Image (cartoon, grey):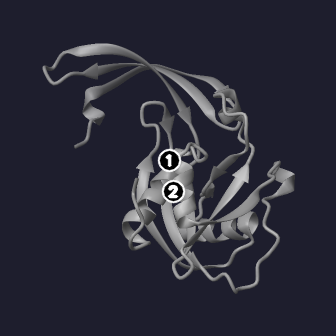
């Protein structure tokens, strides 16, 4: 259901523009009763991205990455984050971007790639979509160095884990990235028979 006819924008200002753009908008919103109410909203405008979970169905393993995340540190997490590999789409289709990120960060050539979700992660604050994918990989296939792109400030360590250990890392707080939790829960329900979704 479209809501565009219920919005009147009065003023919009860019508060900050760098890696992301932060805007403040003054608008009027028409309620169900027909009354117009004034609202003020800030929005972080970011590029759309993809996040993916490489998995080996035969060995029941998944590939994650460990890396530094400044916002996580600001939020009180004083450790490197264990998470699913991700990247901005930058105009590419999600599968193409996923395959490129797998080479850059994990040194992996992926097998079959399948999108599973197209979500807004923080719809009350952030204007960006995140495409979630799962992809097979072959443990016997040659691997590249991975590690990310140093000229972009990336220092990414690939981490291969047994699937059950990854689920345990969610339960005990070693994995706190919501995108990663979503993919692991999807894997528990759809990719690994007998995997607990707890």
Q: Residue 192 vs residue 164: left or right? A: left
The image quadrant that residue 52 belongs to is: bottom right
Residue identified by numbered label 1: 171
The residue lying at 81 percent from left, 58 percent from top is 149
The residue lying at 42 percent from left, 31 percent from top is 124
The image quadrant that residue 117 belongs to is: bottom left
Q: Is residue 51 among what the camera can see? A: no
The image quadrant that residue 103 belongs to is: bottom right
What percent of the width, then of the height, locates residue 70? 72, 35
Query: Which sits in the foreground, 127 or 55?
Result: 55
Q: Residue 99 vs residue 106: left or right? A: left
Q: Residues within 10 Å of mark 2 (few under 14, many from 20)?
A: many
Contact (CB < 8 A) between labels 1 and 2? yes
Q: Given the current orientation, which residue lies at the most extreme top position?
A: 38
Separation of marks 1 and 2 at Cα, in angstroms:
6 Å
Q: Residues within 10 Å of mark 1 (few under 14, many from 20)?
A: few
Q: Residue 164 vs residue 148: left or right? A: left
Q: Given the current orientation, which residue lies at the most extreme bottom position?
A: 140
Q: Is residue 168 among what the camera can see? A: yes
Give the secondary structure at mark 1: helix
The residue lying at 37 percent from left, 64 percent from top is 189
Residue identified by numbered label 2: 167
The residue lying at 31 percent from left, 27 percent from top is 7
Q: The N terminus appears in which quarter of the rendering?
A: top left
What percent of the width, then of the height, locates residue 192? 44, 72
Q: Is residue 118 above or below residue 2?
A: below
Q: Is residue 164 above or below residue 113?
A: above
Q: Is residue 36 above or below residue 63?
A: above
Q: Given the current orientation, which residue lies at the most extreme left position?
A: 33
Q: Residue 126 vs residue 190: left or right? A: right
What percent of the width, then of the height, locates residue 45? 55, 36
């Amino acid at each position: 259901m479209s809501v565009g006819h219920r919005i009147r924008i009065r003023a919009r200002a860019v508060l900050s523009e760098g890696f992301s753009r932060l805007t403040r908008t003054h608008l009027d919103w028409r309620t169900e009763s027909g009354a117009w109410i004034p609202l003020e909203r800030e929005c972080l405008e970011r590029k759309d991205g993809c996040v993916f979970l490489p998995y080996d169905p035969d060995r029941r393993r998944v590939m994650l990455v460990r890396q530094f995340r400044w916002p996580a540190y600001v939020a009180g997490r004083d450790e490197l984050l264990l998470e699913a590999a991700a990247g901005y789409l930058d105009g590419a289709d999600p599968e193409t971007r996923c395959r490129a990120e797998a080479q850059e960060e994990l040194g992996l050539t992926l097998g079959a790639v399948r999108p599973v979700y197209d979500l807004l992660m923080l719809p009350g604050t952030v204007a960006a979509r995140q495409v979630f994918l799962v992809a097979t990989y072959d443990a016997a296939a040659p691997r590249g160095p991975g590690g990310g792109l140093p000229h972009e400030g990336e220092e990414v360590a690939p981490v291969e884990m047994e699937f059950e250990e990854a689920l345990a890392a969610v339960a005990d707080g070693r994995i706190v990235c919501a995108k990663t939790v979503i993919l692991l829960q999807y894997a528990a329900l759809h990719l690994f028979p007998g995997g607990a979704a707890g």
